[in-house]
Amino acid sequence: MSENVQNEYDFISIGAGAAGLAAVQYAARSGLKALALDLSVAGGQVLKIAGLENYPGVFPAANGFAFIQTMQEQAKAFGAQIQSAQVKSIDKIKDKFEIETSKGKYSAKAVVLATGAEHKKLDVPGEKELEGRGVSYCAVCDGPLFRNKTIFVIGGGDAACDEANYLSQLAEKVFLVHRRDQLRAQKAVADRVLANPKITVLWNSVVQEIKGGQRVESIVLKNVQDGSLTEMPAAAVFVSVGMLPKNELISMLKTDQAGYIVTDEKMQTTIPGLYAAGDVRSKPFRQVVTATSDGAIAAFEAAEYIRSLN
C-alpha cells in the first residue's frame, strides 16, 4: 500500500444514500471501521421524496430529508463516519483498495459502490437552456417556486406519478405527459393520479420542444399516433423519465444492457471485495427498501470477506 494513503478503513461506501448509509451502519455495528464518502450531502434520491409512504415500519409518511437525517444519526451512533469528498478513482493493490479523492487518499479492505443513478434528460430543444428556469428534475426541490401555476410532468412511472401528485398540492393545474396509453407506475400510485381532479394525463404524447426566454413559457407536444403538434402554456416542466446508473468509476465491471452493475445475491461484483448496492445495481425493482437491503447484505458479506483475509 502506498505511503501516501492518509486514512485506512476496513470498509468504505462510495455513496451515502440509502444503500450507502445502511451499508456503513451494518459494517460499523459488526465492528468494522466504516466510512461513507459522497460528493455532496448524504441522501441521494431519497432527499427528493416528499412523502416516503411505503417503507415498512415508517408510518405515517416521512419526509425524505428527515428519513435520511435519521439514517445518518443511526449510522454514526454505531461508529460509522460520513465525509464529503469527490471520488476520482479506485484501484485494488493486493488485498486493499486505494481510493483517490478530492480530499486525499483512503484505503479499505472492502468497498461497496453505492453511487446511485442520475436523471435521464429529454434531449429536446430548450431543455438545457431553461434548466433551473422552469425545467427541473426535482419536484420537492423546485415545486414551491411554481405555486398556482400550470405545470407539466413528463413520464409515466412511479416517480413521475408521485411528482405529479405532490405538485398538484401546489399548482393550479398539472399535466402528466406520457408516451403510451397506460401508466407504467404501480397500480396504487397510478390510481391516485387518475383520481386526482387537478391532474390531466396527456396520453400518447412526447415533448418536442420547451420554449421560453428568461423562463419556461410553453411546451410543444407531439402526438405519437398521428404526428400532430400542440403548443401549450407552461410555467414549469418537471422531467421524470428514468435514471442512468453512475457506474463510471470502474469501467471493467460487468453491467447489464442499461449499464447497471451486475452482482450475485451477495452484492459481490466480479472483483473480490468490491460490492454494489442500491440504484447502481442491476435488479428488477428499485425502491428505498431494496436499497437499504442491498447495503445491509453488502456489509455482512464484506465482513465475512475481510475475516477471510486474516
Image: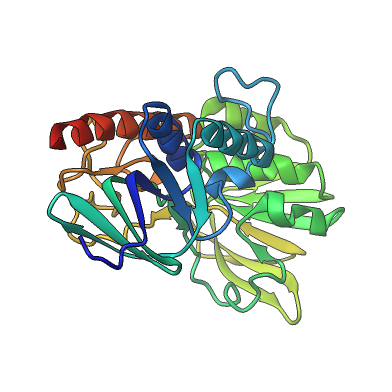
Q: What is the residue that sits farthest to the top in this orientation? A: 57
Image quarter in which the N terminus is found? bottom left
Q: Of 251 and 125, which appears nearest the observer?
A: 251
Q: Residue furthest bottom?
A: 213
The colour scheme applied to this rendered structure is rainbow
Position in image of residue 2 (x %, y %): 23, 65
Q: Is residue 286 visible?
A: no
Quarter placement of the C terminus: top left
- Judge whether 277 appears above or below 191 on screen: below
Q: Residue 173: image x %, image y %? A: 79, 49
Q: Is residue 145 left or right of residue 222?
A: right
At 62% from the left edge and 28% from the top edge, which residue is drawn?
191
Residue 280 in the image: above or below residue 206: above
Q: How many labels were placed on the picture?
A: 0
Q: Position of residue 158 (x, y in %)?
A: 54, 38
Picture layout, residue 283 above or below residue 138: above
Which residue, as the protein is rendered here, is positioned at the far front? Answer: 3
Residue that protrudes farthest toward the right in the picture: 148
Q: Give coordinates of residue 134: x percent, y percent.
A: 71, 67
* Foreground residue among 48 and 2: 2
Of residues 273 and 210, which is closer to you in this image?
A: 273
Residue at 30% x, 68% y: name it: 4
Q: Residue at x 57, y 25 (%)?
A: 54
Residue ID at (78%, 36%): 197
Q: Is residue 281 left or right of residue 49?
A: left
| Residue 231 visible | yes
